[in-house]
């Protein structure tokens, strides 16, 4: 059983912040490259401890890239995606496809389409889900015919990221991915 006095061996380089315990959530978020702490919903009536973690939960705000540990975790299991729920709040669907201009249809409904394909963005470029789900990188498109048309190919994605001022990829990404990035310069 771990006693809490030393970093847990399974936690890697865990931070020991006893003297600064009141600042622990903010410092952890800063260490993770974020300064945005968010409140999470309570688990009601489940018997699980209430809200101990809400002050620790950090967004990837203004961070385009995952850390190596986050990336490796997502390689094993992709993150849960809430793009449609959040995009619906930010920009409700107009009822028309942003690709072809046709109306929503029962047999071909509108759905959120990522300009940078979500799976490839996380897996190949270590982009954060928050970065990929930003409203500027989403469109309402027909599920069947138009969704794939929204997705940028690799070269288009690299060009787009460079226009945003991203000039290099994290060093932990495989050499073949970094070479493909470099070859688009």
Image (cartoon, grey):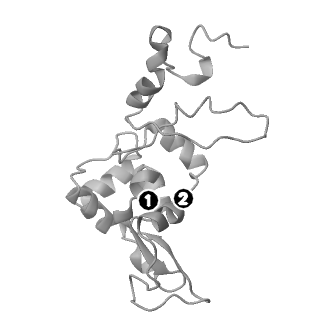
Of residue 54 and residue 102, the one placed in the foreground of this image is: 54
46 vs 98, left or right, is: right
- In the rendering, at what x and y percent does residue 159 appear? 25, 63
User: In this figure, which residue is indicated by the disc labeled 2?
Assistant: 82
Residue 185 showing in the rendered view: no
Answer yes or no: do the residues labelled 1 and 2 have beta carbons within 8 Å?
A: yes
Residue 181's label in the rendered image is none
152 vs 79, left or right, is: left
- In the rendering, at what x and y percent does residue 71 appear? 49, 43
Q: Of label 1 and label 2, which has the lower sequence position?
A: 2
Residue 90 showing in the rendered view: yes
CA neighbours of label 1 inside 10 A, class few (<14), some (14 to 19), many (20+): many
Locate the N terminus by quadrant.
top right
- In the rendering, at what x and y percent does residue 50 appear? 68, 32
Q: Secondary structure at mark 2?
A: loop
Which residue occupies 47% across, 20% down?
24
Q: Secondary structure at mark 1?
A: loop
**Relative vertical location of residue 141 with respect to residue 11 in this rendering, above or below:** below
Q: What distance separates the C-alpha of mark 1 from that of mark 2? A: 8 Å
18 vs 135, left or right, is: right
**Relative vertical location of residue 158 with respect to residue 50 in this rendering, above or below:** below
CA neighbours of label 2 inside 10 A, class few (<14), some (14 to 19), many (20+): few
Which residue occupies 30% across, 68% down?
156
Question: In the figure, residue 98 lies in which quadrant?
Answer: bottom left
**Relative vertical location of residue 176 with respect to residue 145 in this rendering, above or below:** above
- In the rendering, at what x and y percent does residue 22 appear? 47, 17
Task: Please give the count of numbered marks on the rendered protein.
Answer: 2
Residue 133's label in the rendered image is 1
Of residue 108 and residue 11, the one placed in the foreground of this image is: 108
Locate the C terminus by quadrant.
bottom left
């Amino acid at each position: 059983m771990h006693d809490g006095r030393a970093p847990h061996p399974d936690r890697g380089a865990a931070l020991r912040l006893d003297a600064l315990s009141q600042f622990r959530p903010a410092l952890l978020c800063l260490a993770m490259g974020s300064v945005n702490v968010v409140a999470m919903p309570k688990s009601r009536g489940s018997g699980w401890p209430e809200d101990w973690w809400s002050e620790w939960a950090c967004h990837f705000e203004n961070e385009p890239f995952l850390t190596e540990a986050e990336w490796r975790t997502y390689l094993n299991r992709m993150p849960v995606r809430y793009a449609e729920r959040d995009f619906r709040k930010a920009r409700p669907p107009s009822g028309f496809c942003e690709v072809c201009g046709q109306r929503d249809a029962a047999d071909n409904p509108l759905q959120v389409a990522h300009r940078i394909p979500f799976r490839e963005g996380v897996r190949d470029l270590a982009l954060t889900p928050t970065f990929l789900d930003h409203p500027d990188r989403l469109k309402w498109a027909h599920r069947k015919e138009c969704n794939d048309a929204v997705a940028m190919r690799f070269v288009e994605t690299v060009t787009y990221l460079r226009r945003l001022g991203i000039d290099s990829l994290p060093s932990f990404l495989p050499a073949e991915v970094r070479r493909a990035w470099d070859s688009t310069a």
